[in-house]
């Protein structure tokens, strides 16, 4: 026996229920999609980098020397111009520098030439004046007067050039004496005997980051030796490589959270200060990364150069 069909009224009710069920399913799918988009809009990327100084300087010594004493230690706070090391010149370097101070600007020969030229100028000027007077009275040649006038002008030009050269040499020597005065920490004048000690000084305000192991009393060093590194500690910086698909989501001024594992995972706020416009690797077979620099306040000097840092960016 065939089964009986349900009444028409019941079939209509079932159809409406089915439509409501499908509509509910669509709404749920739309909510899931919206939630997924929201998650993507607030996606966080985690990168690692190392803390470094925003400014570092390593002053060099300009002469061959011998360490007399080290005046600072790592971690010391220093000011610009503060002595970091005291040293003496090696014998050869000292003789050369003393000779330079004794010789002065070396303008004696040029000054002697000027005296000779001024004597010639006086004679030629007298001849020119006489020729001019004769030419005016018709007893002399204008041509002779013109030649003497040209000679006077040429002598005047030579004297002026020598005077300019002397002025430049003397100015350069004065600057050199100022430079040596800074190295010796006392005024150096032409012809004086040089003091025994020179000083390497800090070029900036900051902290002593490191001292060369060669900085021992009586150790010899060459010109260009950089025995001490000075750095500014507040603020500090971190540089991290950001993947090419994410870098466009960042901009200068955005904030990030920095976690320092060495400080029991203490967190700091950092601000993006610079975003590279070119990738640090142009090989097409590899993904591109862009260096992003962040600045972190460090008023309590908790952060040190070299600390590992975990940086969390919120990508928009």
Image (tube, rainbow, N blue to C red):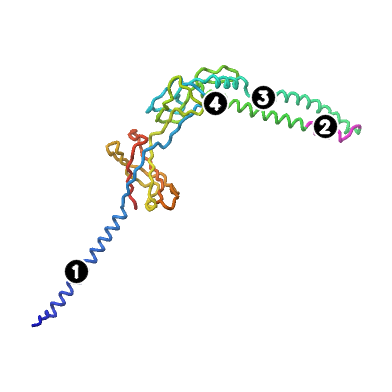
Which residue is label 1 attached to? Answer: 21
First of labels 2, 1 by sequence position = 1
Residue 27, quarter of picture: bottom left
What is the C-alpha distance between the residues marked 2 and 1? 119 Å
Considering only order in the chain, which callout, 2 or 4, is on the residue closer to the N terminus?
Answer: 2
Image disc number at residue 107: 3
Label 3 vs label 1: CA separation?
A: 105 Å
* For discs 4 and 2, the disc positioned in front in the rendered view: 4
Main secondary-structure element of the magenta-colored stretch: helix
Q: Quadrant of the N terminus?
A: bottom left
Element type where label 2 sits in the image: helix
56 or 286: which is nearer to us?
Answer: 286
Q: What residue is at 86 percent from the left and 33 percent from the top? A: 144
Quickly name the residue at label 4. 179
**Residue picked out by circle 2:** 148
Marks 4 and 2 sit apart, C-alpha to C-alpha, by: 47 Å
Q: Pointer 3 and pointer 4: residues touching (CB < 8 Å)?
A: no
Q: CA distance from mark 3 to mark 4?
A: 20 Å
Give x and y (percent) for residue 181: 53, 23
Q: Is residue 279 left or right of residue 115?
A: left
Q: Is residue 252 above or below residue 11?
A: above
The residue lying furthest to the bottom in this view is 1
**Image coords of residue 213 (percent x, y):** 41, 26
> For the magenta stretch, what is the residue range?
139-152
Query: Residue 45, how many percent across, how many down?
Result: 32, 49
Q: Earlier in the sequence, mark 2 or mark 3?
A: 3
């Amino acid at each position: 026996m065939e089964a009986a069909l349900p009444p028409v009224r019941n079939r209509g009710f079932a159809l409406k229920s089915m439509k409501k069920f499908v509509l509910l399913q669509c709404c749920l799918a739309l909510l899931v999609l919206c939630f997924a988009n929201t998650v993507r809009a607030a996606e966080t990327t985690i990168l690692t980098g190392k803390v470094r100084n925003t400014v570092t300087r390593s002053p060099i010594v300009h002469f061959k020397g011998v360490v007399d004493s080290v005046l600072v230690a790592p971690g010391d706070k220093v000011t610009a111009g503060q002595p970091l090391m005291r040293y003496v010149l090696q014998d050869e370097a000292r003789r050369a520098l003393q000779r330079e101070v004794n010789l002065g600007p070396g303008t004696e020969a040029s000054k002697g030439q000027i005296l000779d030229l001024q004597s010639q100028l006086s004679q030629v000027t007298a001849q020119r004046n006489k020729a001019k007077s004769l030419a005016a009275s018709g007893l002399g040649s204008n041509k002779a007067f013109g030649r003497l006038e040209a000679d006077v002008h040429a002598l005047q030009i030579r004297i002026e050039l020598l005077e300019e050269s002397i002025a430049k040499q003397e100015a350069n020597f004065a600057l050199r004496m100022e430079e040596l005065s800074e190295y010796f920490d006392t005024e150096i004048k032409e012809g004086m005997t040089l003091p025994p000690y020179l000083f390497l000084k800090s070029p900036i305000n900051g902290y002593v980051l490191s001292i060369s192991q060669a900085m021992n009393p009586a150790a010899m060093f060459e010109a260009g030796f950089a025995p001490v590194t000075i750095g500014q500690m507040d603020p500090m910086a971190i540089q991290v490589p950001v993947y090419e698909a994410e870098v466009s989501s960042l901009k200068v001024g955005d904030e990030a959270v920095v976690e320092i594992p060495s400080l029991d995972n203490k967190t700091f706020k950092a601000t993006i200060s610079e975003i590279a416009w070119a990738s640090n690797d142009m090989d097409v077979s590899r993904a591109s990364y862009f260096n992003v620099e962040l600045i972190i306040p460090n008023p309590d000097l908790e952060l040190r150069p070299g600390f590992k840092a975990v940086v969390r960016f919120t990508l928009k």
